[in-house]
Image: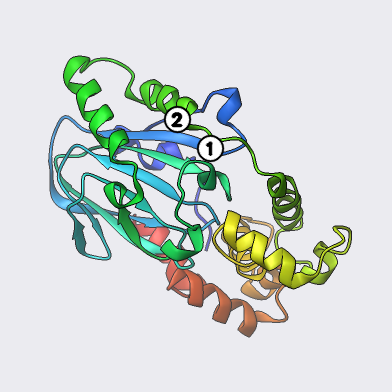
Amino acid sequence: MHNKKHSFADKLAYTGFRQASPSISLQPYIQCYWQIKTKLSFISPSTELLHPNGGLGVIINFGSPLLYEGKNISSNGYMDGIHTKTRQMSLAGHVDAIGIRFNPGGASHFFATPLSEINNSNINLHDLAMGQLIESCQDEKEKNPTGDILKFVDTFLLKKLTEPLKTDALVQHIAIKIKLNNGKNTIAETINDVGKSYRQIERLFKASIGMTPKQYARIVRIENARTLLKNKNLQSFTEIGEVAGFYDQAHFIKEFKSIIGLSPTAYVNFKKKY
């Protein structure tokens, strides 16, 4: 039932995947930068699962169109919005793309559009007044084809960083508490020390992170369950569901499938295959 543990980078080695950390000033907002680039084109599509984690990403594509759920994304620069369900991404043809992975709430410092308005969708960066990022990256690749494009992106975003909002500390405090308890505590327990009502917290959370605290906690709980599926000391879905904070095995399987799109068994088999 369990796979040998590999890092995310190991699994994507065939794509030329590399990852870079942001500057210290950007680390509260950006989780990482990444790049995929291959010398040879893929004859047949290669599929990866993209799981929700409460954050969102920006992708700038210099190669063949990427496929999400079998559909081509023809835009060369877009925001991959906050998703509440797992999706399949396929790589085909010439692969050459870079990405920015934001921490939950981090993107709100760079985009004026409320994040809750772009859930479960891909939006062209030109529509978000960030077309300059696409054009600047394309110019940089032409001028300096052997340079570090991820370092260039980091410098670009440092110049775009806005002043932190006063509500950020409160939202981040709650998001961190949810993450630390793996989404298992009730929201009432999580916000009992902040001095605001749930409706106030929900409004702030949606503005900064793009979803409600309950939605975020649900995603975090499933994220933890995926990790537990690799734990060789847990021999059954009943045990995994209990440790992850679900009422019983049926509840665990139902919630897992509603977000991942696969049952735990099908998910484990998919990971073995790919």
Residue labelled with disc 1 = 30
Q: Residue at x 45, y 30 (%)?
A: 157
Q: Nearer the viewer, residue 54 or 208?
A: 208
Secondary structure type for disc 1 = strand
Kind of element beneath mark 2: helix
Depth order, front residue of 24/227:
24
For label 2, the residue is 157
Q: Position of residue 175 (x, y in %)?
A: 69, 54
Instruction: Relative to 162, say whether 2 is above or below.
Output: below
Q: Quadrant of residue 214?
A: bottom right
**Is residue 125 left or right of 172 when viewed as pictured?**
left
**Mark 2 residue crowding within 10 angstroms, few (<14) / some (14–19) / many (20+):** some
Figure quadrant of the C terminus: bottom left
| Residue 29 x/y as whole percent | 57, 39
Query: 14 or 98, which lies in front?
Result: 98
Say whether disc 2 or disc 1 marks the residue closer to the N-terminus.
1
Badges 2 and 1: C-beta atoms under 8 Å apart? yes
Q: Residue at x 49, y 67 (%)?
A: 84
| Residue 54 higher or lower than 70, as above or below | above
